[in-house]
Amino acid sequence: MENTIIPEKRTIIRQELNIEKWPLFAPSTYRKKSREITRKVLLENGNSAERKVTFGKTQQGEMGILRIVDYKIFCGLVGIWEEAGKPKEGKTNFAIHNLAKLLKLQWGRSTYRHIYKALERLKVVPIIWEDSFYQKESNTTERMVRYFNILDDLVIFERRAGNQMYLAFSSFKLNNKIISNLLNNHTKPLYLDEIVKLKKEISVLLYRYIDLIMADKNHFERRTQELFSDLELSEYRYPSKRKQLLAPALKELEGAELSTGIISQANLEKTTDGKDWKVVFRKSKKA
């Protein structure tokens, strides 16, 4: 008698597309307290335009940036918001220890602090979108969006009461513009399970990039110099350093499930001119 393989239940969320298309979340190696990302785009009429996103800058000074760990926490919050029925108004209740469980983090005091700090950054780090935030409801790319935070509201109240009981009355509210786009399907599917199990920061950046760029293709190659520019990691100027960073991440990504297939190949090859390396990705169909 043949064995029956029961497919693993996947946790799939719909993630807001502006967030996914811009590398808003920086690795721990980034030391500055603010960031600017600028892109040149070609418009339908043939003219070019500049899109810019600025993080952590106010008239009072620099307030810090968003980290890759914050992205994982944000994905978990979107999952909790979906489970709560996708409320348009009001707050979504949650407990930090349940968020840790969803993200498969071992519970303890350090995990609590780790999540608390990430939630705090999602609430306080300001973002300025210049000709770069698309609002599906009005079908416009907004000229200027200031005072934008990932979370519009955050209340954390967690207290241990005795050995067994744990009181948790925390709540959050996603940014209204994010909620609007989520409800109006300016989104893409995202496998939360895959994001959760990736241990290396560069793996998370690459997974998001590949999931978008390979949505309509089964093969993709990119020189590491241009790839790191796409990922806003241009401080890695030497090919040997880029190779050192990429090799373990590509190994971690091989076999990962994308929204449109499986990464069947993820490796490095020397470029034809011998001056750089290139990443080579291949995608196969899901079983």
Image (cartoon, rainbow, N blue to C red):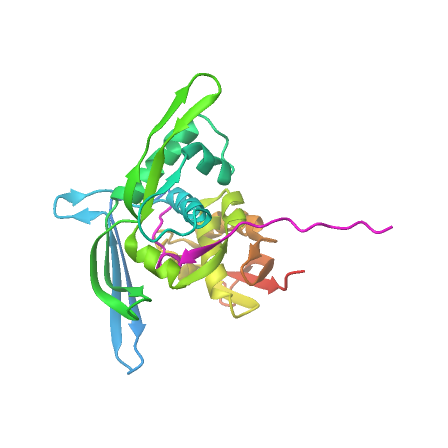
Closer-to-camera residue (104/242): 104
Q: Is residue 7 left or right of residue 72?
A: right
Q: Is residue 76 magenta?
A: no
Quadrant including the C terminus: bottom right
Q: Image point 26% across, 79% down: which residue?
A: 47
User: Which of the 4 image quarters holds residue 112?
Assistant: top left
Q: Is residue 119 left or right of residue 202?
A: left
The magenta region covers 1-27
Q: Image point 39% across, 46% down: which residue?
A: 74
Residue 173 seen from this side: yes
Determine the main secondary structure of the stretch shown in magenta.
loop
Q: Is residue 51 left or right of residue 111?
A: left
User: Which of the 4 image quarters holds residue 99?
Assistant: top left
Q: Image point 30% across, 77% down: which residue?
A: 43
User: Which of the 4 image quarters holds residue 118?
Assistant: top left
Q: Is residue 3 magenta?
A: yes
Residue furthest right in the image: 1
Above or below, 123 relative to 52: above
Closer-to-camera residue (222/66): 66
